[in-house]
Image (spheres, rainbow, N blue to C red):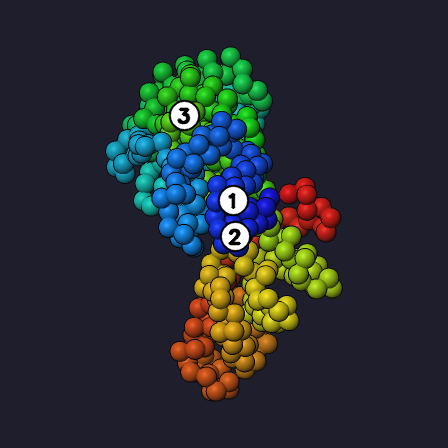
Amino acid sequence: LGGSISRAIQQMSNATIIDEKVLNDCLNEITRALLQSDVQFKLVRDMQTNIKKIVNLDDLAAGHNKRKIIQQAIFNELCKMLDPGKPSFTPKKGKTSVVMFVGLQGSGKTTTCTKYAYYHQKKGWKPALVCADTFRAGAFDQLKQNATKAKIPFYGSYMESDPVKIAVEGVERFKKENCDLIIVDTSGRHKQEAALFEEMRQVSEATKPDLVIFVMDSSIGQAAFDQAQAFKQSVAVGAVIVTKMDGHAKGGGALSAVAATKSPVIFIGTGEHMDEFEVFDVKPFVSRLLGMGDWSGFMDKIHEVVPMDQQPELLQKLSEGNFTLRIMYEQFQNILKMGPIGQVFSMLPGFSAELMPKGREKESQAKIKRYMTMMDSMTNEELDSSNPKLMNESRIMRIARGSGRQVREVMEMLEEYKRLAKIWSKMKGLKIPKKGEMSAL
Ligand code: GDP
Ligand code: MG
């Protein structure tokens, strides 16, 4: 998928004359890819129409500006679609706010409630959790466990079956205790059922939340719009959180959720753990949607370019997310052997642009060789460590002396390593597909 978009843009980059046909071809290719990323058909069509309005080929000067403008227009249009035009209600530290979470069962509400509470607690807030899910057996235990782990006060009951009653009691109690962020976790159902929406309406009416957050599983596909709309119709949804972004789903449903609720995405969930939670950032999200810096495309490339016998080992290292200097060294070796530099790593954002700018392959190659010379003066301990603190001043000076380079250059190389390690760490936990399973991604 990512490959096809990169290809589409690549094709466009190669064309000297960019005419309507090229634009259409490119748009069609991207349309297909966006549909596969679960963006709603209507939204894709709207985007296409808007792009055609914005990109007036006759008005544009010839040459490379044109294709830059088309690329940028597509990117901007998708960013705009994720912006409902007004920010969501933002709770204020020290002032009591009630935030209610809604979403289908399994979407990640309970997990996300704790993440949201924990995120604020770290910033000095006094959050509290209320379990108003009386539908699912074990719901209270789950919340209790999460809350205890994060040392966040919680309220709930094993006996009471009325969610409204519990919600009200919990909110009242924590208001008295001067909590500034009272989070109400609610129940879900497997399907969109009238009973669920009625329950949400009642809990909302009774607790008067300042903000209702709709929690959406990134892998629900084209169902996102209807689901978000159904919740919006029963409660005043004011923000969206997209969960499970660590999986393979690109989360195109987020565009639907924004359109259906006219509310912004505020956070994304990137794992099961408490701190796997990020403030939503439009641009990287859209990059991912478009397959720029796309992991599955990256995997394709690895199978294509990395020598067969080295693949299992590299993939293993990838999934461990442990990027040592030795791995960097080995990858540099691959790159140099490969000829056209950086075929693999050009798939990653940041890598190609900074380490291997287009059209400057010779310089990049020289730089990589220089880095490798410096790494030749490193000890095994240094090469195999993933502890950035290990590289202290005396080690850096020793490496510089040993390789006949400047201290400044060694530091530059280590900076490069850190930058790559950061990108690499995002691959942690990656499910490794075997060759031939690529289409499943
Ligand atoms: P609820 O029914 O809406 O309350 O959903 P839960 O919070 O119980 O989550 C359902 C499952 O999804 C649990 O196994 C969670 O650990 C998992 N989950 C929630 N958020 C994420 C996420 O961001 N990434 C991953 N990988 N799993 C998640
Ligand atoms: Mg739950």
Q: Nearer the viewer, residue 66 or 155?
A: 66
Residue at 63% x, 60% y is 317
Q: Is residue 235 above or below residue 147?
A: above
Q: Mark 1 packing: few (<14 Cα in 10 Å), some, or many (20+)?
A: some
Q: Nearer the viewer, residue 143 or 341?
A: 341
Q: Is mark 2 within 8 Å of ligand 1?
A: no
Mark 1 in CB contact with mark 2 (< 8 angstroms): yes
Quarter of the figure with the C terminus: top right
Would the CB of label 3 be found within 8 Å of ligand 1?
A: no
- Residue under pointer 1: 22
The one nearer the camera, 425 or 150, is 425
Find disc 3 in the rendering and name its residue.
261
Label 1: element kind = helix
Q: Residue at x 39, y 40 (%)?
A: 56
Identity of the residue drawn at 33% across and 20% down: 208
Residue 4 position, x and y percent, is 59, 46
Q: Earlier in the sequence, mark 3 or mark 2?
A: 2
Q: Earlier in the sequence, mark 1 or mark 3?
A: 1
Q: CA distance from mark 1 to mark 3?
A: 35 Å
Regarding mark 3 in the picture, which secondary structure is present there?
A: helix
Residue 98 location (% of width, % of height): 34, 28
Q: Nearer the viewer, mark 1 or mark 3?
A: 1
Res. 127 image quadrant: top left
Q: Position of residue 232 (x, y in %)?
A: 42, 21
Q: Which mark is residue 15?
A: 2
Three-letter amino acid code of the residue under disc 2 = Ala
Viewport quadrant of the N terminus: top right
In this view, the mark in front (3 or 2): 2
39 relative to 310, above or below:
above
Mark 2: which secondary structure?
Answer: loop
